[in-house]
Image (tube, helix red, strand yellow):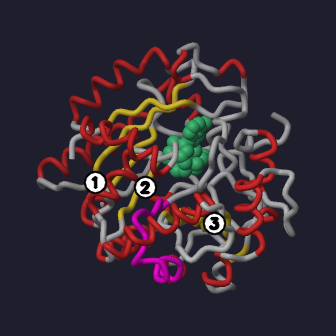
Amino acid sequence: MKLENINLLTPLARKIGGDRVSVPHIMAFLQYNSFRKMSNLARLLWEKKKCRDELVGLPFILFLEVNNICNLHCPFCLTGKGKKGERPKRNMTLREMKGVVEPLAEVLYFIQLYNWGEPLMNKDLFKLAEYAHRKKIFTMVSSNMNFSSSTIPQDIIDSGIDYFIAAIDGFSAETYSKYRRGGDFNKAIKNLQTITELKKKQGSKTPYIEWQYVVFRHNQHEIQAAKMFAEDIGVDYFHPIKGYVEDPEWITTLEEYRSDLGSPESVTDCARPWTHFNVRVDGGVASCCYEYYKKDDFGNVFTTPFNEVWNNDMFKASRQVIAHGVGTSTSKKTICHKCIATGKRPSFEENI
Ligand SMILES: C[S@@+](CC[C@H](N)C(=O)[O-])C[C@H]1O[C@@H](n2cnc3c(N)ncnc32)[C@H](O)[C@@H]1O
Ligand code: SF4
């Protein structure tokens, strides 16, 4: 489906599913639907509307952190800064990944196969993507594109990954490496080009390729050149986005991409504790990807069955505080309490 048509659907989709609904979510809904998925989705939206804290519905979006290691050192990324968040640095095994997906496979529309790490550094990523593909679940990956293995571009195509984000923030070696520290611009571009060429040559429909460009002051003047190049090589969607910024000098002067220091976005009506299941590399669980430190986990799906986690006291407390406000008394305190109290999603660094 063409991007223009998806963009036409976006306002309606956001009205129903909330302001975080984006292009890949709509694709997942259109491509991998079923009666079972639709009825679960409808039930969950109804449960959210009724402010239910104990749910019959199951999450339909899964964030699976396939690893928390990386080959780069982006200065505003917690992994890039070397923070461990009290977790081991590791790759999730294929067995662990399948163990998380299995109980939810019939209702999942979407799996985001990364969180706080470089997913292509997990060699089992492609096997999991193939497995999800067979189960008719949409998969999305975001990569810094600094891989050296020559087999990866073909693996990306063969595994059936539906949506592939190439995260390249700049259009010259100089601007690129200011944020993507330790990264090689020419390598990232070459890898992107190899994937687009293979896809074209083999007539493959997947992956849909997004070039995601985080806009900072130092790279804002290269957006147009990058966009033109992206169109030339067959990127499906060139996507400049607002950056999460911890240094005032990095804030762009382009109004449409400006964000406040240390605060990526405001929270209006968050639905994530109803719709999302976010699994960290060690099995730690929370309702959203803003959760980083182990002390904030809602539970652990490597040690506890999914059914016992999804409606536990932490999940219920997070739904209660979103539904009824910070004044409500809950048996536990969660990261959601802070979002609701401040009206902003948390800054990753407390001192910002
Ligand atoms: C933590 S990264 C992990 C995936 C992969 N390593 C990558 O960089 O694409 C998750 C997403 O955050 C984006 N990201 C990284 N730093 C960012 C920033 N300062 N502002 C906005 N998005 C950022 C990345 O481009 C990526 O799409
Ligand atoms: S490439 Fe991705 S995971 Fe690695 S440091 Fe940068 S943003 Fe973080």
Identify the residue at horizontal 64%, vertical 36% (top origin).
265
Give the labeled residue for mark 2.
141
Residue 171 picture quarter: top left
Nearer to us in this view, 10 or 348 = 10
Which badge, 2 or 1, comes first in the chain's sequence?
Answer: 2
Q: Which amino acid does label 2 sit on?
A: Val
**Seen in the image, is 171 located left or right of residue 341?**
left
Q: Residue furthest front?
A: 50
Residue 263 picture quarter: top right
Identify the residue at horizontal 11%, vertical 53% (top origin).
203
Q: Disc number at residue 280?
A: 3
Instruction: Give the magenta-colored segment's residue range.
Output: 98-113
Give the labeled residue for mark 1.
207
Circle 1: element type: loop
Q: Where is residue 106 in the image (x, y as percent from the top left)?
A: 39, 78
Is residue 106 magenta-colored? yes
Which badge, 1 or 3, comes first in the chain's sequence?
Answer: 1
**Seen in the image, is 250 located left or right of residue 125?**
right
Q: Where is residue 60 in the image (x, y as percent from the top left)?
A: 47, 66
Residue 67 picture quarter: bottom right
Q: Tell me the distance, in whole angstroms, between the alpha carbons under discs 2 and 1.
A: 10 Å
Q: What residue type is labelled 1?
A: Pro
Mark 3: few/some/many CA within 10 Å (<14, 14-19, 20+): many
Q: What residue type is labelled 3?
A: Arg
Which badge, 2 or 3, comes first in the chain's sequence?
Answer: 2
Circle 3: element type: loop
Say whether mark 1 is within 8 Å of ligand 1: no
Q: Position of residue 35 (x, y in %)?
A: 32, 73
